[in-house]
Image: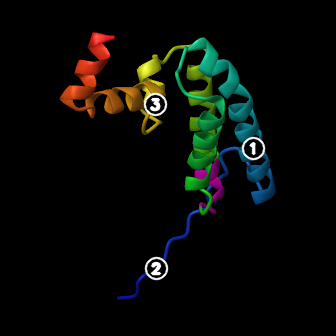
Amino acid sequence: MSRQVATRIVRPVLSKTPTEAKKGVNALYRDFYREMDWTCRSHMLDIPIKVARERVKKEFLKNKDVTDIRIIDMLVVKGRMQLEEIHNMWGQSYNLYAYFNETDTQKRKVAKSSQSFLDKFYESSD
């Protein structure tokens, strides 16, 4: 009994060549980079714009080793949907905070909670 190997020809989602896929990724990154300024102000996030842009870069670098064009296109489409949600304010602020480890407010709360009894006492007597 011989085994036959089936091959399947798949059509690309958006891009036909890796160069086209790379252009789509670069355009999405550029759009996210530009959007972060408006997003931080409109959502009133206590995250500096520089930190937000670094986080965007980190998210893009997570998938730098993906070489399959169809997967790259799928990630670009998902990124576009996420960008639209952020821009149209369909997602709440706490959804955006999920991307960041610590915000300035959280750092202040931790610093305040780590104060000793005497530090708190001295603050209240002023």
**Magenta residues, as a range?**
66-72
Above-or-below relation of 67 to 15: below
Residue 74 in view (yes/no):
no
Q: Which of label 1 and label 3 is nearer to you?
A: 3
Instruction: State the residue at coordinates (66%, 27%).
Output: 36
Q: How many marks?
A: 3
Mark 1 residue crowding within 10 angstroms, few (<14) / some (14–19) / many (20+):
some
What kind of residue is marked 1?
Gly
Q: Nearer the viewer, residue 95 or 111?
A: 111
Residue 27 coordinates in the image, percent (x, y): 77, 39
Residue under label 2: 4
Amino acid type, callout 3: Thr
Query: Can the viewer see residue 46?
Result: yes
Q: Earlier in the sequence, mark 2 or mark 1?
A: 2
Please tell me which residue is depicted at 47% across the width and 36% down the height of the picture: 100
Cα–Cα gap, marks 1 and 3:
31 Å
* Left/right of residue 51 with respect to residue 2 in the rendered view: right
- Is residue 71 within the magenta segment? yes
Q: Secondary structure at mark 2?
A: loop
Badge 1 or badge 3: first in the primary sequence? 1
Residue at label 3?
A: 103
Q: Which structural element holds mark 1?
A: helix
For the point 63% across and 51% down, the residue is: 72
Q: Are marks 2 and 3 in contact (CB under 8 Å)?
A: no
Quarter-wise, where is residue 111 in the image? Answer: top left
Q: Which residue is mark 1?
A: 24
Viewer-nearest residue: 109 or 76 = 109
